[in-house]
Image: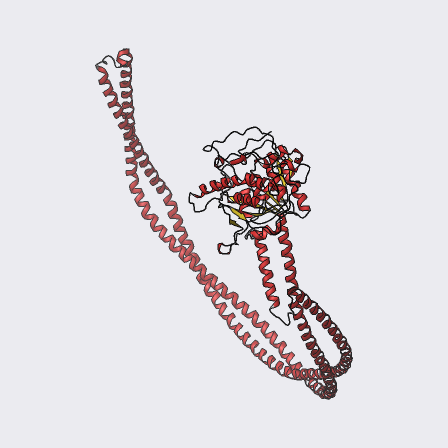
Amino acid sequence: MPIDVAEPTPPLGTDTGEGGWRELVESVYGPLTEFYEGIDARLREVPEDVPPVGWAPHIGAVRALRDGQVAGDWDVLARFLVAPGTLEGAEGPRLVQVDEGDDARVVRDAVRELTEADGRALLIAPTPEKAAELLRGLEGDPDVFSLLIETRPETAEARSVRTQALPPAEEPPAEQEPAPLRDPGSNGTVEFKPLTGALPEPEATVTRAEPLPSLPPVEPVEPEEGPSAPEARVRSAALRPVGEAWRLSWQTEARLLQRGLMSLEQWPRDAAALQSVRAENLRRAEQLEAEKAGLADAIEEARAAAAGAQEAAAHADGEAERLSGVQEEAEAELAGPRAEAERLQRAADEAGAEAAAQTRTADAAYARCVQIDERAKTAQSELQGARQAEASLTDELARAREALPGAAEEAHRLTAADADAAAEGHAAYYRLVSAESALSALRRKMTLGQRLHVASPPSELRGLREEVKARTREADEAATRAREAKEAAEHAERVRRGLASFVSEGGARLKAAQEAQERLGTELTWLAAEREKVGAEHQEQARQASEAVERATEAGLRARAAHQVAQAIEERATAARTSREAALAAAAQARSDAEAAATRAAETGAELARRTEEAAAEIAELEAELETVAAAEGRSRENVLEICGADPADDPEAVPAHQRRAMARIEELTGYLEGGRAAGSEVLLRTADLVVGTPAGAGLTVRDEEFDALIVADAGTVTDGEFLIGAVRARRWILVGTAGTRPPGYREYEGSPSGRLELSPFERASTAAPGLVS
């Protein structure tokens, strides 16, 4: 069935010569190129600070097809686009028709199959959301290096689906941007750079394409109501690494660089260790020689010390014999003075005991005198108090007896006044009760109207009310007067009773004061006589105690003098004995020192022989250690020579230069891993196994990069221009789509030629060549 297009493709099999396919491609895609150029020019008519991407990638891709500048087999790609039926039974693009929602699995299997064969793929999807969704199923594969092309702004209709991506790739600065990959063509289009080598010859020369069966007509889109194309909205695009493969690769490279740095750091340590061991060996050899010399000197010193100790022992023995005679002479002289000192000490002790007894007796008499003086002083004070109490009580009793009759008369008068005030209060109360009773009786006689204040009250009501008020005041005043009279009568009675009680009790108190004066006078007389008697006794006893103390003091002085004489003789004997013992001890010590010095000299000789043997063994060990460290330093030097290409001893800057380069690269990789630094887009593109994005994003970022395969997701919604953006850069083409899907109708595509923007290559090929569909 024919397809409704402006210029239907000719039937397959007409022979037009060698250029048949090129003429057919030119006839179909020349008008499409001009259409793209027109809408792109209209888009550029509105100046903007950051212009949208427009249709320049589409124009360049179509021009590359027309000029034969494609990465894969141009003949196969051209026949697939203008006459897909000619590819049935031959090797051509792969079409995969899936149910809705099953395309992610097919895309994932295709990517894994390609990467297992060490191939690189470009995966394009109609929207950023679809691209990110497909990439989510691949980003966990540690063997696939994936890049996501992010366009900005993302879309105008939906929110973007995020992936676990690393920071976006860094674009080179403006002054360092590479030369443009495409040059303007003759019609204002963009041409790809020419490929080297001849184009592949077509399998068959045809002049007309196989007619496609007609498909249901597509409803025209109202330009003013449809959405705008992404090319009119997208301003820029960036590459973002996605998945763990990048991170693992960077981590591996960083570890290898760190190992190299550790190897470089090892040589300075080995060189320093070699120098340190050499210095230590020299120092230790000198130290061992000094130890042997010191042991030889110690042997000579020990022998000299033994000879000196023998001489000292002989001199100490002679001194001990002399001091023994001095000690015996002093001990014989000590006997007489010691006996006299002991006798005098006994006499002094007896005199001291007698003086102590006399002193205690005198002290007891003195204490009795002090006690009598204190009691006499207290009795004198008590007598003075009794006299003052007698005088005070005599005056107060006289005044109380004089005031008692008046107080009794005043109490009697106030009691009578209290009785009168109480009677007056009762009378006033009864008059008030009578007035209130008369008022109540009159109120009971009042009618209901008078009670409700409707009719006039009785004429006598007002008078009775006034009388009740007057009687109330009289009763209150009478009660107040009665209360005041009662309080005055009670106070007068208390005064009277107090005076009567004082008059009755004052006589007894006065008599007691007089009796106390008599008793205290008698006691003071006795105390005076007793004080005189005890004072005389104390004076006699004090005199006797003084005489006894003098006698004891004289006896003590005589005993002390005798003790001093005996002590001097005893000290002379003790000094002689001590000196003799010291001389004997010195002689013994000298002989012991002589023996110890001889033993020490022998032991030091044996130590010298032993240390000589040990020093020889230690020197041998140090030499062996030096050889080991020297071998390690040689191996480290060889490692540095292998890593840096120069001997560190000849070129001291070789190691620091390599370390700086390695540290810079490690810092760069650490920035990639921690998200603080972005990798360059060109490096990422050269390394990536899979690049995923929209056609517009791919046109902005992949430039002249070539891929082993192009995978198109939702291929039924991808137009020829969008397909060609990736197709001209790939050697194989895999289209995955759902039957019946069509490209969206953007308002910019009104009046497009040849129906190339209403039907996708996937839809045309699956209809014209069902054998290509799997």
Task: Give the total number of marks visible in the rendering.
Answer: 0
Residue 264, image x and y in percent?
Answer: 64, 65
Looking at the image, residue 264 sits to the left or right of residue 534; the answer is right
Residue 172, image x and y in percent?
Answer: 52, 54
Residue 297, image quadrant: bottom right
Q: Nearer the viewer, residue 621 or 748?
A: 748
Residue 73, image quadrant: top right
Residue 709, image x and y in percent?
Answer: 63, 44
Looking at the image, residue 676 sits to the left or right of residue 303; the answer is left
Q: Residue at x 28, y 18 (%)?
A: 434
Relative to 448, is 58 above or below?
below
Looking at the image, residue 125 sits to the left or right of residue 390; the answer is right
Relative to 439, is 587 above or below?
below
Q: Nearer the viewer, residue 586 or 496?
A: 586
Relative to 606, is 496 above or below?
above
Residue 552, image x and y in percent?
Answer: 57, 76
Residue 556, image quadrant: bottom right
Relative to 377, is 66 above or below?
above
Looking at the picture, the colour scheme in use is: secondary structure
Residue 636 seen in this snapshot? yes
Q: Nearer the viewer, residue 206 or 168?
A: 206
Residue 714 seen in this snapshot? no
